[in-house]
Structures are given as C-alpha cells and as structure tokens.
Amino acid sequence: MSILFIFLGFVLLVVGGEFLVRSSVAISFRLNLSRMVIGLTVVSFATSAPELLVSLQAALEGFSDISLGNVIGSNIANIGLVLGLTALVSPLLIDRDFYRFNWPVMMIFSFVLYFFLLSERILSRMEGFILLGGIVLYLVLLIRRARRKPELQADEVDPNLQTTSVFKMLIWLFIGGVALYGGSELLVTGAVELATTLGVSERVISVTMIAIGTSVPELAASLIAALKQEKAISLGNLIGSNIFNIASVLGITAIIQPIVVKSEEMLTSDIFWMMGISFILIPLAFLPRKFTMGRLKGLLLFIGYVVFVGLAFLG
C-alpha cells in the first residue's frame, strides 16, 4: 500500500501543481501584471507548491526529516538528475547571468541554511522570516535585471490564459489546492510506511524517492525542451528552482512549524552533497570548454547523483 500511496501522491502533486500554475497565471493577468513579473514570481512560487505542501505536511505531522530531506534531495536531484540527463540528451549553453548572479545567490542561500541548521539543530520561525525576506530581495533584483534585458522574458507564461473566465480560474484553483493537499498527505503517509517496511530512515526515503518525485515536473519539462532543441531551456531555471526550494519552501514551512534536525546525516552528509554538487557547476561551466554543458559533463553529474542515492541507502 505504501508504494500505491506514494505513486498516487506523485500523480496528485503533478496534477495539482499544473492547475495551480494555470490558475495563478490567469489571476495574475486579471491583476494586470506583466508576463515578465508573472514568470519570475507567480510561476516560480506556484511551481514550488508541491515541495511546500510536502514539507509543510511532514513538519506538521512531526516528520521534520522529510521536510528537510525533500528540499535538500530535490536540490541535488535538480542538478545531478535533471541537469545531468538533460545535458546528455542535448548540450546546453550557459549564459553569463548564471555565474554572475544566479549561482552566487544559490550558494549564499545554501550556506545560510547550513549555518542556521548547525547553530541549534533547528530552523526557527525567525530564520524562516529571514529566508523569506531573502527571496523577496532576490526577486526584486531579478525583476530589475530582467527589465534591462528583454531576452530574459519568461516563455513559459501562456498568453492565452489572459482570456480565462473567472469561473474556470476558480475551478482550476480548487482542483489544484485539493490535489496538492491530497497528494502531500498520501506521499508523506506512504513514505513513512515504506521507510518502516524497508527498515531505513525517513530521511533516506525523503532525499531519494520523494525528492525525485517532486523533481519530476522539472525533469519532464527540461527533457522535452532538450528533445525539441529549444534554446529557451537554461541552467538559470534549475538554479532558480533550488533558490526557491530553500528560501520559500523551508522559509514558509519554518514560519508555520519550526523544523528540527533529527538525523545527523542531514548535516554531515546530505547538505554537503547539496552544496558540493552546486559548487562543481562553476568549474564545469568553464572547463574544458567555456559556457557549455555537454554530454560528458552531464554524464559526470548523473553518475554523481547515482553515487549519492547509493550511499544514502547503504549508509
């Protein structure tokens, strides 16, 4: 039953996330927000909703390892699994904004999270507010940069949603909310049951299976774009997802329910994997060929992710 719960949870999270994004974009158009602002803020928050609901549900039920493991594991999966497989399918171009802005911001948030957790083994409400304040500052800077560079306009915002009726928006919002809530409930329940059955910790299941599941939308979108040879796909999208996971998902969760570190491995292994696989993107961006993420680099990232998953279960 645990596998069924996890599978149904994944399906509901994907469906709920899609409907929430559509309704959020349609409502934003009604509020006369520009496509750029919608793409950089509304879509970013809405696509982080599955991770948020899972982390919040787990924290409220006392499974804080799942709250933390979901975000840390998702960030590792976004780079090792999603970026690795995408680069294997089609080499990616790396824009200068990656190492001038997005990557440094991701590393700053990663280190801040580590020191917050290390200090008292808890992510407090005050620290949650600090993370949330950080994401607001990041978005302000992001919008300013985007206004100076028209090529940074978000292509994922469907202009056809401008004509969506109010009734349809409300239906989408309702379906999205119910599906996300139900999916997070089933996923957390299934993960706890599976961990008990396999005799492994909740942390292991969260940094592997749950993390992969909540990264499926990014993986599907990236692979489809790579197969279609769309140049719109960029490293910045995945980096932005990692920033939102740390700052908004853990920030909001900690404000509602402080997150306690229960597994020592979170601070001695998992978070170092997250920071390490993030840091290695810089040398990969410049060596041996500048500003490209080719198949060999993608293979290295994917192998690194497989090693991480293997060590998580073996440990």
Image: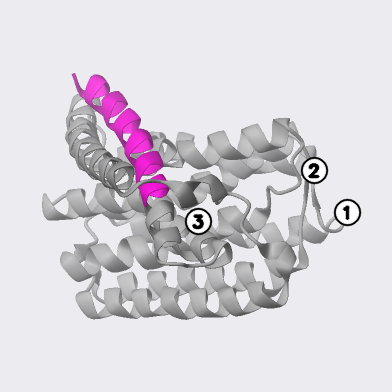
Quarter placement of the N terminus: top left
Residue depicted at x 57% and y 59%: 239
> Which numbered dot is residue 244?
none
x and y, in percent, of residue 270 in the image: 42, 53
Question: In the rendered structure, are the residues bearing label 3 and label 1 in contact, judged by CB atoms less than 8 Å apart?
Answer: no
- Please identify the residue farthest to the left as the structure is shown: 61
Q: Amino acid at mark 1?
A: Arg
- Element assignment for label 3: helix
> Which numbered dot is residue 241?
3
Separation (CA) of disc 2 from disc 1: 9 Å
Residue depicted at x 40% and y 40%: 18
- Element assignment for label 2: loop
Pointer 1 local density, CA inside 10 Å: few below 14, some 14–19, many at least 20? few
Q: Is residue 168 magenta?
A: no
Question: In the rendered structure, are the residues bearing label 2 and label 1 in contact, judged by CB atoms less than 8 Å apart?
Answer: yes
Main structural element of the magenta stretch: helix, strand or loop? helix
Q: Is residue 158 visible?
A: no
Look at mark 2 in the image and give the residue it sits on: 294
Q: Which residue is nearer to you in this view: 243 or 200?
A: 243
x and y, in percent, of residue 305 in the image: 55, 40
Q: Is residue 235 visible?
A: yes
Separation (CA) of disc 3 from disc 2: 21 Å
Q: Which one is closest to the eye, mark 3 or mark 1? A: 3
Sequence-first disc among 3 and 1: 3
x and y, in percent, of residue 107 in the image: 55, 69
Q: Which residues are magenta?
A: 1-23
On screen, residue 144 above or below 13: below
- Element assignment for label 1: loop
Residue depicted at x 54% and y 66%: 34
Look at mark 1 in the image and give the residue it sits on: 289
Question: In the rendered structure, are the residues bearing label 3 and label 2 in contact, judged by CB atoms less than 8 Å apart?
Answer: no
